[in-house]
Amino acid sequence: MKFGSILFASALATLSASPAAARMSLPDPSEVDAADNPRLPPYLQCVPYARQVTGIQIYGDAHTWWGQAEGRYARGYKPKVGAVMAFKPSGNSTLGHVAAVSRIVDARTILIRHANWSPINGRRGQIEDNVKVIDVSPANDWSSVRVWYAPLQALGGSSWPIQGFIYPSKPRPSEQLAARAPRASRDSIAGIITRKMGW
């Protein structure tokens, strides 16, 4: 009998002996066995994977990366290959999310590499490469995106707010000032100039 199955049987015996514990929900035995199956890929969080593939040495929950990057790494609001796209906490993603940009397809479409987004074969914590992301922000400023979701084999229905992009380079003084400016104020000024100049 596998170790996971022993734990399951032990927990089941505890439930039988304790009526108060009967409200607990136990994992399915196949999930317990799968957890210690060496043939399955390991469970991986988004943070160590993004750090590994980009070389950006930031630690801690994903939602803290944008703030931690200030003064250490260049930041901005345009995707670049090798950058980390930092998601804001939203909905059931209370810790945010980070992903690595792997390709720019067009002005509103990129491909990313990330971990722990879609369940793959029923398991979370898996790595996905070349995942489609589209910018759905009204101002085309990458402040809101939709992300490919493997169980649907399509873009997910939710829009996810983005803090911005962290680039694997040191910040220049002008980049630091630009990154500190609220996105809305920069977008409105940029929009006015673009409209006036007819660009």
Image (spheres, grey):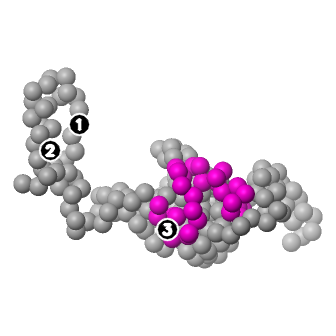
Give whichever of discs 3 and 1 has the lower sequence position. 1
- Residue 61 lies left or right of residue 36; in this view the side is right
Q: Which mark is residue 133?
A: none
Question: Label 3 belongs to which residue?
Answer: 52
- Which quarter of the rendered picture does the N terminus lie within? bottom left
Placement of 50 over or under 66, stated as above or below: below
Range covered by the magenta-colored residues: 48-76
Cα gap from disc 1 to disc 2, whole angstroms: 11 Å
Question: Label 1 belongs to which residue?
Answer: 25
Cα gap from disc 3 to disc 1, whole angstroms: 35 Å
* Magenta-colored stretch includes residue 179: no
Q: Residue furthest left?
A: 1
Residue 157 lies, in percent from the top left, at: 50, 55
Question: Residue 2: in sight, yes or no?
Answer: yes
- Which quarter of the rendered picture does the C terminus lie within? bottom right
Residue 47 lies, in percent from the top left, at: 49, 58
Q: Nearer the viewer, residue 121 or 134?
A: 121
- Residue 82 lies left or right of residue 153; in this view the side is right
Question: Label 2 belongs to which residue?
Answer: 8
Q: Residues within 10 Å of mark 2 (few under 14, many from 20)?
A: some
Residue 63 lies, in percent from the top left, at: 57, 49
Q: Nearer the viewer, residue 94 or 173?
A: 173
Residue type indicated by callout 3: Gln
